[in-house]
Image (tube, grey):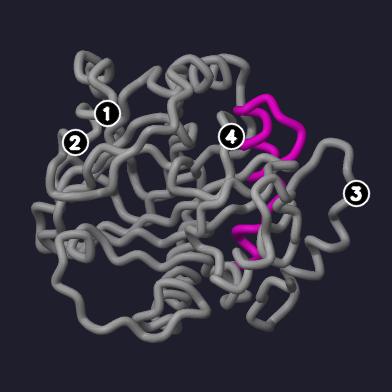
Amino acid sequence: MNTELTQTQIESYRNNGFIVIDNFLSDEELGEWRGAVDQAVAARGGRKLPWQEEAKENTSYYDSVFIQRLNLWKDCQRFRKLMLDPRIGKMACDLEGIDGIRIWHDQALIKEPWANPTSWHLDVPYWSFTSAHATSLWVALDDATFENGCLFFLPGTHKKRSFKNVGIGQNMREIFNVHPEFATIKSVAAPMKAGSCSFHNGLTAHAAHANMTPGWRRAMTCGFMPDECVFNGTQNILKKEQVAKLKVGDPLEDDRQNPLIYHRTKEHKSKLREFAESSEVIEAIF
C-alpha cells in the first residue's frame, strides 16, 4: 500500500481540498479489497446499514445513483482488517494536520450500468458532528473514467468553511443555489485507474458523472472524523436509541461505533487489534 505522502502532496491537498494518489494499492491488495467488498456487499443484501431491515425495491432517483452499503467494517471481518489500518489513519491525519482520526462510516458506492450522476454536494454537513478537518477516502476498485462515473472536485471550496448543503438529487446545479460563489470555479476531473485513490476534505464540493456504460464502477469510501468531535444533533447513521441518549455537545468517542484508528500520542493499538480480529457484528454500546 502506497501510504507515504510528500510535503508537496500535503500542501496541494490543503490548498485544493483534495488529492489523487495513483497506485495506492498493489495488484494483490486490489484483489483483496475487491474480494472483501464484494463479499461484504453480497452478505448485506438490501440493508444499507447493518442494523436495518431489508429495503424494498426502490425506483427513486437517488437509488439509481449508486448501490450504497455503509459500515461494512462492522459486519465483515475480512473488510474490517483493511479499513481499520492505522497507516490509512496516519495519512488522513497528515493531510489534515491533526493528531487523531476515527472512522465515521465507510461505504461501498457502486454505480450500476447506466446509473444516474451524483450531483454536487459536501460530505460533513450530513454527519453527526461539525468539523473543518473531516476527510473522505475514495478507492477505485474499477477504473473510474469519464464514461462510467469518475469524480469531479471544485478546488478550494473547503476554505469557505460553510456547512450549507443540499441533497443528492436530480438537479446537478442545486449546490449553487446555496453557494453561488462556487459557480465560477472551474471543476477538476479525477479519473482513476483501479487501485488508485483520492482523499478530499469534508467541505470540498464534489460530484460524479453518470455511468454511461453497460459495466460496473465499484468504489470503496470512508469518511473520517477527527478525534474529540462532539454530537451536533444530526442522526445520520446513528440509531434512534443512540440519538436519544446523546445531548448536543456530547463527545463521540465510543470505539465500537467510531473506532480510533490512529493517534499520534494516545494508546489505542490494543483496542484496534481487538476490533480488527473480531468476527462478530460490532454494535455500539449505549
Q: Nearer the viewer, mark 4 or mark 3?
A: 4
Q: Earlier in the sequence, mark 4 or mark 2?
A: 4
Residue 23 lies, with reference to residue 189, above or below; the image says below
Is residue 279 toward the left or the right of residue 146 in the image?
right
What kind of residue is marked 4? Ser
SS of the residue at dot 4?
Answer: loop
Q: Nearer the viewer, mark 3 or mark 2?
A: 2
**Picture layout, residue 185 above or below residue 142:** above
Q: Residue at x 58, y 46 (%)?
A: 232
Label 4 Cα crowd, 10 Å radius (few <14 / some 14-19 / many 20+) = some
Task: Name the residue: 43% across, 65% down.
Answer: 34
Q: Residue at x 48, y 41 (%)?
A: 124
Say whether marks 4 and 3 touch (CB < 8 Å).
no
Q: Is residue 191 visible?
A: no
* Residue 221 in the image, given as x and y percentages of width and height: 46, 52
Q: Which residues are magenta?
A: 80-100
For the residues labelled 3 and 2, say whether their Cβ atoms are less than 8 Å apart: no
Decide: few, some or many residues near mark 3? Use Cα within 10 Å; few <14, some 14-19, many ≥20.
few
* Mark linked to residue 178: 1
Alpha carbons under labels 4 and 2: distance apart = 23 Å
Q: Is residue 83 magenta?
A: yes
x and y percent of residue 152 in the render? 27, 33
Q: Residue 67, relative to residue 15: is it above or below?
A: below
Q: Nearer the viewer, residue 39 or 27?
A: 39
Residue under pointer 3: 267
Mark 2: give few (<14), some (14-19) or many (20+) Cα within 10 Å.
Answer: some
Q: Return the x and y of residue 257 as percentages of the image width and height.
A: 67, 64
Check disc 2 and report its element: helix, strand or loop: loop
Asked if the residue under mark 3 is in contact with the one under mark 1, i.e. CB atoms within 8 Å, the reply is no
Label 2, on which residue? 174
